[in-house]
Amino acid sequence: MVQPRPRRRDFTLLLAALLCLASGMARAESGYLVVHVEDTKGHPIGGVRIGTKGDGGTASTADDGKARIRLAKETKEGSFVPLQIVESQPGKDFEMISPWDREIIVPSFANESKNFVNVVVVQRGDRMALESGTALAALAAQINKANAPKSADKQAPPEDPKANLAAVAKQYGLSPEDLDQAIRVWGAKATDPYEAGLAALYERNYPKASAQLADSLQKREEKLTADQKAVADAAFFLGLSLYGEGKYKEAATDFQRCLQFRPADTVTMNFLEVSLAAAGEYAAAEPLARRALIIDENAFGHDHPTVASDLNNLASLLQDMGQYPEAESLFQRSLAIYEMTLPRGHPLIATGINNLGLIHQYRGDYAGAEQCYRRALAIDEKLSPESLDLAIDLNNLGIILEAKHEFAEAETFLRRALAINEKILGSNHPEVARSLNNLASLLQAKGDYAGAEALFRQALAIKTATLGPNHPSVATSLINIASLLETEGDYAGAEPLFRRALAIDERALGSDHPGLAIDLDDLAVLLTRKKDYAGAEPLLLREVAVDERSLGSDHLEIARVLNNLAELLEKEGEYSRAEPFLRQALGITERTLGPDHPITKRVRQKLQALLDKESAKKTER
C-alpha cells in the first residue's frame, strides 16, 4: 500500500504593520509631512525631534506638539513612510505607540485641517501605559505581529509567545507579567470591535477574533475615504485570524484587500501567497512569490537576507508543487546568501540546510537528508540546548531515522523535540500536537499500537480545543487515528473517521484542494482492503483529477495514485483497464526521475508482470 502524502505545513502569518490616521492639523505643504505628537491622554508634547528613516528630514515639535518634516524628493501623497523618534525631551525616553508599526501614509499636501498624522508616545517604564486603551491596543498589535513567523519557510520554527511578550514589554520598560494581565483585562472590557478582535487574537481565540475584526472591517470600510489605512489594518488582522481558523480562501480575500493599499509591499504579497497556497491555489500563489522576490532584489540587491527569505518562500511553494529541481536550486541560492551575509553558525543557516534536507527526503534520498539534518542539528545545538529551532532539527532527524527503521535513535530525538516544545510553548500548543503525532507515528511503526493511539488522541484533543472541531489540522489527526485502526484491522472503526476527515476538508478547503487527494486516497485504500472495489475506484479517479488540476500532469503523486488504481483493477482481473494507468505512471516516472531510477524500474516491472497476466488470460480463452 502506498503511504499517505504529507500535508502542507500550517503557517501562522507575520503581520505587516499598519496604523490609523487622525484628524485636525493645518499648514500642509507639498513635500512636507505635518505631525502632531501627543501622549495617551491627548496632551501635546513639545521638544521631541521626529523624522523619517532614510532620505528626508527631521524636525522638533513646538509646544503645541506640531512639527513639519521635509520628505524625500520622490515621496508622493499616499506613499508609506517610516517614522522614528530621533531625540526625546531632556531627561525623557519616549517610545512611539501610534503608529505602532512606525509607518504612516502621507496625506494630501493640500492645506486642509485634516491633512496631518497623529503620533502618540509614552515614557519608557511609565505604568500609566497599562491603563491606556490606546497603548494596550498598540502593544497587543505588536505582540500579535511578533507571534507570527518571519517567512513562509516550512523549516521556520513557531514563534515563542512568551519571548515575544517579554521583548515588547522590555521595549517599553514594562514587566511581561504586568503587560499580559493588562492586555487580558483590557480585552475583556473592550467594546470597540477592532480592539476586542486584537485582544482575542492575542489569546488565539480565532473565532471571536474573526467575528470582531470582520465587524471592524465593515465599519472602517464605510469610512474608507477618510482612513484607508485603518481599513487595511482591520483586513490584515482579519486575514490572520481566518488563517488561524483554517479558512484559507477567506484569509486570502482579506490579505488581497490589504494589498490594494500596499501594492508594492512584499510582506503583504508573501502573506497572500501563503494563504493561496494553503487553499491549494498554486497557480495564483506562484506569481506573487516571484513578484515579491523581484521587488526585494531591486530594493536590496541580490545578496540580501530578505531576498534569501523570498527565495525560501518561493522554493517552498515549488516544492509543494513537485517542482523539485527549481526548488532545490532556490534553496541552495538562499543558503549561499545566508552563509555569505550572516555570522557563521547563525540559525538561518541551519534552516537553509534543513530545507535542502527536505528536498533529499522527498526524493527518497534518506542518506542525503540525514546528512543535512545532522549538520543543522550541530549548528543549533551550539546556540542553545533548548530552542524551537533545535526542536525542528530533532523532529526532522527523527522522522528520517524512522524511515530508515532506526527506531531507537529516532525515538530519542522525537521525545526530546516534544519536551522542548512543551517547555517553551506549553502543553496545549498546536506545535506540541504535531510533535505528539510524530512520536505516535514512530510508536505505530514499532508496533506499539496502544501507545500510538493514546498520543494520536491526545494530539486530536489539543487541536480540537485550540483550533476548533472543523479545522483541517483536526482532519489530519482523525486520519492518523483511522490509519492506526486500519493497521490493526479495525476497518469498521477507521472508515467513519476517514469519512469525517474528508467532510471537514471538503468544507474547509473546497472540493479541488490538493490536500483533499490525501483523504480520498486513504479512504480508497481502506475500501480496497475491504474488497469494496466499486467504492474505491471512483475515489481514486477523483484523486487523479484533483492532483492533475493542482499539480500538473507529470507530478510523482499522480504516478503513485495511478499505480494504486492499476493495482485495484488488477485485483478485479481487469488487466486491460489497468494497463493504460500503469503506462501513464511509467511515463511520469521516466520523465520526472529518469529511466534508471529504482521507482521507475519497479513500475516497469509491474507493467511487464501485468502484460504477462493479460497475455496468459487471452491464451486461456
Image (cartoon, grey):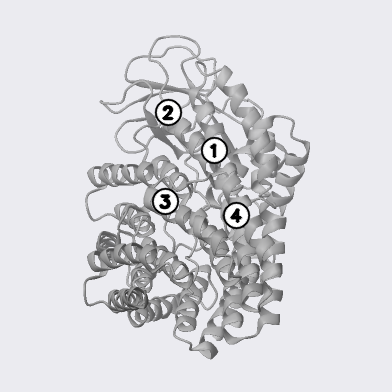
- Left or right: 78, with 116 as reference point: left
- Left or right: 450, with 612 as reference point: right
Q: Secondary structure at mark 1?
A: helix
Give whichever of discs 4 and 3 has the lower sequence position.
Answer: 4
* Residue 424 visible to an observer of this rendering: no
Instruction: For marks 1 and 4, give the one nearer the viewer.
Output: 4
Q: Quadrant of residue 530?
A: bottom right
Q: Which residue is mark 2?
A: 261
For badge 4, the amino acid type reads Leu
- Rendered location of residue 387, percent (x, y): 53, 71
Give whichever of discs 2 and 1 has the lower sequence position.
Answer: 1
Give whichever of discs 2 and 4 has the lower sequence position.
Answer: 2
- Rendered location of residue 119, percent (x, y): 52, 30
Give whichever of discs 2 and 3 has the lower sequence position.
Answer: 2
Q: Which residue is mark 4?
A: 502
Q: State how far apart marks 2 and 4 are (Cα).
A: 37 Å
* The one of 417 and 579 positioned closer to us in this rendering: 579
Residue located 45% across and 75% down the image: 383
Q: State how far apart marks 2 and 3 are (Cα).
A: 37 Å
Q: State how far apart marks 4 and 3 are (Cα).
A: 16 Å
Give whichever of discs 1 and 3 has the lower sequence position.
Answer: 1
Residue located 54% across and 27% down the image: 230
Q: Which residue is mark 1?
A: 250
